[in-house]
Image: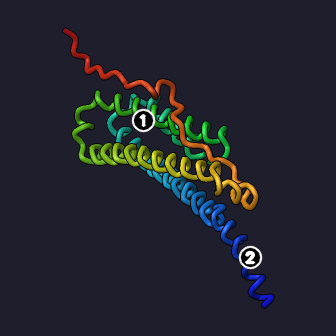
């Protein structure tokens, strides 16, 4: 009989704990961490493509050393920043370094427009296509990460999961990825030099 009373007494407590995010909080946190790992993976893919792109362009554009140096230096800075998704300053530094690399790559691609024989090179065309695809993957990975962070942050702030999140896990909100490139919120102006 005492065993039955013990089970009867524990049943409501177990039910209450199961409704407090005991399992859902770590699952949501791991999902957000995995989404961040995907963001880093796509940035690494871009960083891996840059040396190949630079070497290809160097063969054609030896006088464009400044742009090539900027791309190489931006890549080095972007790959040195490590991120803790719960640290807003680290996230801003990471985003700024990646934005700088993106800007340097844009300048490189504009420079390439001056070299028709380079643009027609199959190797360059393949690298440029891979880079464009990587930029799309980065955008998707950042979006997926932000969605996972939103779900996690919502879960740890709403009842009943917030009880388990605070008491058992000491959960802290994660920081979403934000665009930090100056003027990123405005559409770029495209000018092909066609003047009336």
In the image, 160: left or right of 38? right
In the image, 49: left or right of 161? left
Q: Nearer the viewer, residue 55 or 93?
A: 93
Looking at the image, the residue that sits furthest to the right is 2
Rendered residue at 73%/55% (across/down): 166
Rendered residue at 39%/43% (across/down): 135
Looking at the image, the residue that sits furthest to the left is 196
The mark lying in front, picked from 1 and 2, is 2
Looking at the image, the residue that sits furthest to the top is 196
Q: Nearer the viewer, residue 132 or 109?
A: 132
The residue labelled by disc 2 is 10
Q: Is residue 72 above or below residue 21?
A: above
SS class of the residue under badge 1? helix
Rendered residue at 51%/46% (across/down): 146
Give me the disc on residue 105.
Answer: 1
Task: Give the CA distance from mark 1 to mark 2.
Answer: 61 Å
Q: Residues within 10 Å of mark 1 (few under 14, many from 20)?
A: many
Q: Is residue 62 above or below residue 21?
A: above
Mark nearer the N terminus (1 vs 2): 2
Q: Position of residue 168 (x, y in %)?
A: 74, 61
In the image, 131: left or right of 93? left
- Residue 15 visible: yes
């Amino acid at each position: 009989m005492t065993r039955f009373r013990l089970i009867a007494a524990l049943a409501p407590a177990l039910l209450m704990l199961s409704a407090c995010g005991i399992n859902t909080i770590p699952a949501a946190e791991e999902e957000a961490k995995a989404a961040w790992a995907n963001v880093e993976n796509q940035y690494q893919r871009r960083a891996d493509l840059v040396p190949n792109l630079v070497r290809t362009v160097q063969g054609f554009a030896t006088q464009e050393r400044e742009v090539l140096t900027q791309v190489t230096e931006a890549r080095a800075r972007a790959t040195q920043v490590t991120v803790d998704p719960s640290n807003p300053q680290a996230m801003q530094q990471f985003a700024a370094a990646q934005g700088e690399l993106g800007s340097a790559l844009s300048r490189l691609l504009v420079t390439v427009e001056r070299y028709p024989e380079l643009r027609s090179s199959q190797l360059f065309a393949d690298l440029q296509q891979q880079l464009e695809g990587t930029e799309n993957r980065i955008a998707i990975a950042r979006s997926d990460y932000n969605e996972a962070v939103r779900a996690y942050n919502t879960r740890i702030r709403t009842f009943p999961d917030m009880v388990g999140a605070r008491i058992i896990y000491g959960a802290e909100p994660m920081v979403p990825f934000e665009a930090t490139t100056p003027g990123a919120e405005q559409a770029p102006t495209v000018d092909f030099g066609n003047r009336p």
